Image (cartoon, helix red, strand yellow):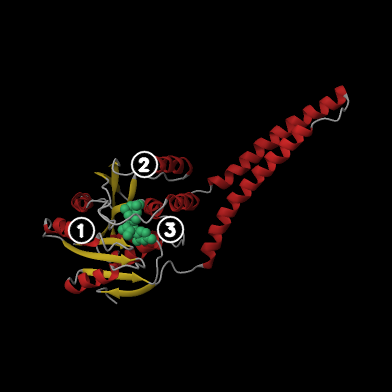
Amino acid sequence: MKTALLIPVYNEEEVLPFLWQDTQAVLQKLPQETFEYIFVNDGSTDGTLAQLKLLAQEHSNVKVISLSRNFGKEAALSAGLAEGAKADAVIILDADLQDPPELIVPFLEKFREGFDVVYGQRTDRQKDSFLKRVTARCFYKFYNALAARPLPENAGDCRLLSRRAAQAVLRLPERERFMKGLFNWVGFRTAGVPFARQKRKAGKTKWNYWQLWNFALEGLSASSTLPLRLWTYCGFLVSGFAFVYALWVAAKKILYGNPVSGYASLMVAILFFSGVQLISLGVIGEYLGRVFTEVKQRPLYLIDEKINCEP
Ligand code: UDP
Ligand code: MG
């Protein structure tokens, strides 16, 4: 049985030596297994690629797929899965050792028990910053309230996929790839393995909060059309309210005549409803933008070079 370790890397030169050391230590404990590494270099601008090339020269089981530029982690994972789906199972790890390589052992155990998807569940996020924990929690709560298929809370990309699960993910053609949503969508027998999220071993995170916010929006709009439908309900509610108000205004006119007043209520109504309309247009725009990206049908990523991969 062959297991592929899929690791996306973007400017990780500082952490690569640690990663190699720690994963090797775990693999040595599993001598009966065959492993290969699939590093996806996501357009690094530092010494990452040079280091990967050295590793690939020394070890024939180190495959490197180097993308033509930085396409983002989701695209890098897709590129790696295309290669990894040839193995019996693929295990996705972050390069920075936040997902401890020791997870490989329980992942493979679960796989043997017949699970197709085994995800790492971050039960302990004490090492993440407070803001990150709170925003992550809010995201999962909100997402699960909207999406048709709720995500397991605090499960990241770190997981094992059987070959058929990996192939299923590859069959999903969308350009906007919210991988956690896609992994979740394919189904199959799924198990979680709890672990404590570690601190980044070296180097810096590639995400700031603005990017995370956009990522969250992408994830939501990719997995639910509820935000669009909400405006229908909102419209009904407002129309109902407007009808009642109209009756009241008419009754007042009939009973008391028409002293010219109502400037304030008029202004409030105009401002309120223009706001509501702009927001709803914005939501439609969000989805329209996604439709635009999808219809362009651009490839998800471009490969610059492949090392140690079969042609
Ligand atoms: N990564 C990537 N492309 C990117 C950003 C990140 O391949 O554009 C990789 C990065 O090298 C790491 C993983 O994705 O292996 C997770 O990134 P990071 O640790 O910065 O994210 P965080 O753990 O802070 O969410
Ligand atoms: Mg990280």
In primary-sequence order, the first of circles 1 and 3 is 1
Say what amino acid the circle numbered 2 marks: Arg
- Distance in Å between CA atoms under marks 2 and 1: 26 Å
Query: Which residue was labeled with disc 2?
Result: 133
Secondary structure beneath disc 3?
Answer: loop
State which quarter of the image contains the C terminus.
Answer: bottom left
Question: Where residue 77 appears, x then y in whole percent?
Answer: 35, 61
Quadrant holding ligand 1?
bottom left
Say what amino acid the circle numbered 3 marks: Arg
Query: Which residue was labeled with disc 1?
Result: 18
Question: Where residue 305 appears, x then y in whole percent?
Answer: 33, 75
Q: Which one is closest to the eye, mark 3 or mark 2?
A: 2
Residue found at x 26% / y 72%: 50
Most distant residue in the top direction: 255
In primary-sequence order, the first of circles 2 and 1 is 1
141 lies left or right of 91: right
In primary-sequence order, the first of circles 3 and 2 is 2
